[in-house]
Image: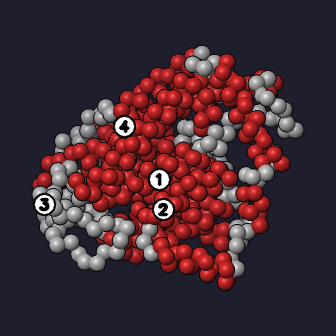
C-alpha cells in the first residue's frame, strides 16, 4: 500500500513541478531529507526519487517565467570556488575513479543549492521551504521521542533504514540542526507571525498546530539523546543555552526539571549515561580511539599534501594504504572514515580546502546574524528574524557536532546556505514599514497587548493568492518588492 501511495504522490508531483517550478525545490528537499522511498516495502523501496524530482525541476527552471536572476553573493561565490577546487583535487586524487564519482554526487547537491535562490523568493515560498525542511526531520524527532519514552531510552533511535540518515549519528545531527527550526515554527503558528500560506486549514488551526509543534520540539530533544550519539549530544549541549535564553517561562522550566529529578526520580537511562561517560574515558572506548586514529591519518595526509589532500574517497583504497598514515594501530582492522568534518576536509582537500569551507561557514553564519539583528525592526518581519535565529543556532550545532561526525556533504547544510542567500535578499528587497517608530513586541517577554497598528506582514482584504502561485500577498508594496 505504501508503494502505491508513494508512486501516486510522485506521479502527481512531477507534472506539478513542471508547471510550478518552485514546488520542485520543496519536493527535492522532502525526498532528500524525509527519504520516503525507504519507508516503502517493495517496488518503490530505494527508488531514485531525487533524480526524478531533480530532472523535473531542471526542466521547469528553463520553462519558468517567474524565476529570479542568480544571486552573486559571497556565499554563492564561495560555493563556485569550492566546486572548482573539488574538481582540481579530484584530478590529483590518489583514488581517481572514486573521487570523480563522488565529485558528481557533490555537484548534484550544489546544483540544487544554486537553483534554489532562483525559484524560492517572497514570504510564502520561503516559509513553505522552511516548513518542508523542518517537518521532514521533525517527523523522526516525533517518532523517536515517543519510542524513547516507551522503551526508557534503552535502544538507539535510528533514521530510515537504507538512507543517508539511517545511522544514529547522522539522524542525531539532523535533529540537532532542525531543533531550533521546530521551536521557531511553533512560535510562528502559535503567534501567527507569518502570512497566509495558501491553505485554509493552516490558518484556521494555527494555534493548535503551534501547540503540537511545541510537543514535537520536546520529543525531538528526547530523541536526540536517545540516538546515543556522542557527537549529537555535544551538538545539543552547544545549542541548549541559546534555546533556553530564547524561551519564555524559564523559571517554570527549571522548577519542572527540579521536580522531575529530585522528587519524581526521573534520571537518564543507564545505557545513555554509560555512553556519555566514554567521552571522559575515551582511552577505554574503541569507537573513540578509532576517531583519534583516523584524525591522525587525516593530519598526516594533509601534511604530505597540504594544497590538494588525497581527494575524495581516498580511504577506500584499503586498510594497508590507510594504516600507513596512522600514528598507531588498534585492534580493529577495517577502513575508517575521517569521523570529522574538519579532519575529513584536511584529508580530502588539504588545508586549503578546509580554509575555503570554513570561510563559507563564516559568511553564512554572519549573514544569519545580520538578518536576525535587523529584520524585526527594519521591515517588521518577525518570521524572518526568528527563522534566521533558528538557522544560525542550527548551523552552530552542525559546526560543533561536525567535530566528531563526517557530514561535510550533507544536503541539509547546503539548504541552510541557500536559505541564507534567499533570506538576505528578502530582507534587502522588502521595504521598511512607513512608521519606523512602531516596533513589534520582543519574543523574549510576554505579549501584554496587541500592536496599535496592523503589522506589515498580515494579509490585506484583497483577492487571495492560490498556493500554487507562491506569490506574496496582495499588498501593493509587498508585491512590488517581490517582483524585483
Q: Which mark is residue 163?
A: none
Label 4: which residue? 115
Q: Nearer the viewer, residue 131 or 443?
A: 443
Q: Nearer the viewer, residue 4 or 446?
A: 446
CA gap, disc 2 and disc 3: 31 Å
Q: Secondary structure at mark 2?
A: helix
Label 1: which residue? 393
User: Compared with residue 51, is residue 463 higher up or lower down, i.e. above or below?
Assistant: below
In which quadrant of the rendered view does residue 461 lie? bottom left
Tell whether label 1 touches label 2 (CB within 8 Å).
yes
Q: Which mark is residue 243?
A: 2
* Among numbered discs 4 and 3, the one appearing first in the sequence: 4
Residue at (54% x, 26% y) in the render: 353
Mark 3 Cα within 10 Å, few/some/many (few <14, many 20+)? Answer: few
Q: Position of residue 288 (x, y in %)?
A: 76, 45
| In this rendering, position of residue 467 left or right of residue 282 | left
Mark 1 Cα within 10 Å, few/some/many (few <14, many 20+)? Answer: many
Q: Which mark is residue 435?
A: 3
Q: Nearer the viewer, mark 4 or mark 1?
A: 1
- Residue 131 seen in the figure: yes
Tell whether label 3 touches label 2 (CB within 8 Å).
no
Q: Nearer the viewer, residue 338 or 5?
A: 338
* Among numbered discs 4 and 2, the one appearing first in the sequence: 4
Q: Secondary structure at mark 1?
A: helix
* Among numbered discs 2 and 3, the one appearing first in the sequence: 2
Q: Secondary structure at mark 4?
A: helix
CA gap, disc 2 and disc 1: 8 Å
Residue at (41% x, 58% y) in the render: 131
Amino acid at each position: 500500500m505504501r508503494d502505491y501511495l508513494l508512486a501516486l504522490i510522485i506521479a502527481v508531483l512531477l507534472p506539478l513541478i513542471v508547471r510550478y517550478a518552485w514546488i520542485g525545490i520543496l519536493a527535492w528537499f522532502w525526498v532528500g531529507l524525509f527519504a520516503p522511498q525507504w519507508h516503502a516495502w517493495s517496488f518503490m523501496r530505494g527508488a531514485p526519487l531525487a533524480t526524478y524530482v531533480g530532472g523535473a525541476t531542471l526542466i521547469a527552471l528553463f520553462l519558468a517565467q517567474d524565476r529570479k536572476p542568480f544571486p552573486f553573493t559571497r556565499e554563492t561565490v564561495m560555493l563556485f570556488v569550492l566546486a572548482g577546487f573539488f574538481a582540481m583535487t579530484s584530478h590529483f586524487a590518489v583514488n581517481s575513479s572514486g573521487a570523480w564519482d563522488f565529485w558528481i554526487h557533490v555537484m548534484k547537491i550544489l546544483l540544487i543549492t544554486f537553483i534554489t535562490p532562483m525559484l524560492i523568493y517572497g514570504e510564502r515560498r520561503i516559509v513553505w521551504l522552511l516548513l518542508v525542511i523542518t517537518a521532514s526531520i521533525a517527523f523522526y524527532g516525533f517518532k523517536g521521542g515517543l519510542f524513547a519514552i516507551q522503551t526508557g531510552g534503552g535502544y538507539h533511535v535510528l533514521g530510515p533504514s537504507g538512507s543517508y540518515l539511517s545511522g544514529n549519528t547522522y539522524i542525531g545531527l539532523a535533529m540537532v540542526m532542525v531543533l531550533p527550526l521546530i521551536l521557531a515554527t511553533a512560535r510562528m503558528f502559535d503567534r501567527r507571525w507569518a502570512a497566509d500560506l495558501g491553505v485554509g486549514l493552516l490558518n484556521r488551526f494555527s494555534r493548535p498546530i503551534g501547540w503540537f509543534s511545541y510537543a514535537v520540539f520536546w520529543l525531538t530533544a528526547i530523541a536526540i539523546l536517545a540516538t546515543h550519539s556522542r557527537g549529537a549530544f555535544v551538538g545539543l549541549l552547544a545549542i541548549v543555552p541559546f534555546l533556553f535564553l530564547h524561551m519564555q517561562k524559564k523559571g517554570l522550566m527549571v522548577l519542572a526539571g527540579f521536580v522531575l529529578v529530585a522528587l519524581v526520580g526521573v534520571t537518564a537511562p543507564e545505557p545513555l549515561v554509560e555512553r556519555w561517560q566514554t567521552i571522559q574515558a575515551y582511552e577505554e572506548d574503541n569507537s573513540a580511539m578509532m576517531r583519534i586514529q583516523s584524525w591522525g591519518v587525516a593530519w598526516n595526509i594533509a601534511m604530505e599534501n597540504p594544497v590538494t589532500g588525497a581527494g575524495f574517497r581516498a580511504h577506500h583504497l584499503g586498510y594497508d594504504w590507510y594504516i600507513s598514515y596512522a600514528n598507531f594501530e588498534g585492534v580493529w582492522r577495517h577502513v575508517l572514515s575521517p569521523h570529522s568534518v574538519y579532519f575529513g576536509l584536511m584529508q580530502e582537500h588539504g588545508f586549503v580546502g578546509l580554509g575555503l569551507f570554513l570561510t563559507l561557514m563564516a559568511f553564512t553564519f554572519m549573514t544569519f546574524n545580520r538578518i536576525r539583528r535587523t529584520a524585526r525592526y527594519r521591515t517588521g518581519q518577525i518570521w524572518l528574524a526568528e527563522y534566521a535565529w533558528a538557522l544560525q543556532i542550527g548551523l552552530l550545532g552542525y559546526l560543533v557536532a561536525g567535530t566528531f561526525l563526517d557530514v561535510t556533504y550533507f544536503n541539509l547544510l547546503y539548504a541552510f546556505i541557500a536559505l541564507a542567500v534567499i533570506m538576505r535578499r528578502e530582507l534587502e528587497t522588502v521595504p521598511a514599514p512607513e512608521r519606523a517608530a512602531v516596533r513589534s513586541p520582543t519574543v523574549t517577554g510576554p505579549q501584554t497587548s496587541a500592536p496599535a497598528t496592523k503589522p506589515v506582514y498580515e494579509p490585506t482584504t484583497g483577492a487571495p493568492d492560490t498556493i500554487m502561485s507562491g506569490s506574496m500577498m496582495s499588498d501593493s508594496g509587498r508585491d512590488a518588492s517581490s517582483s524585483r
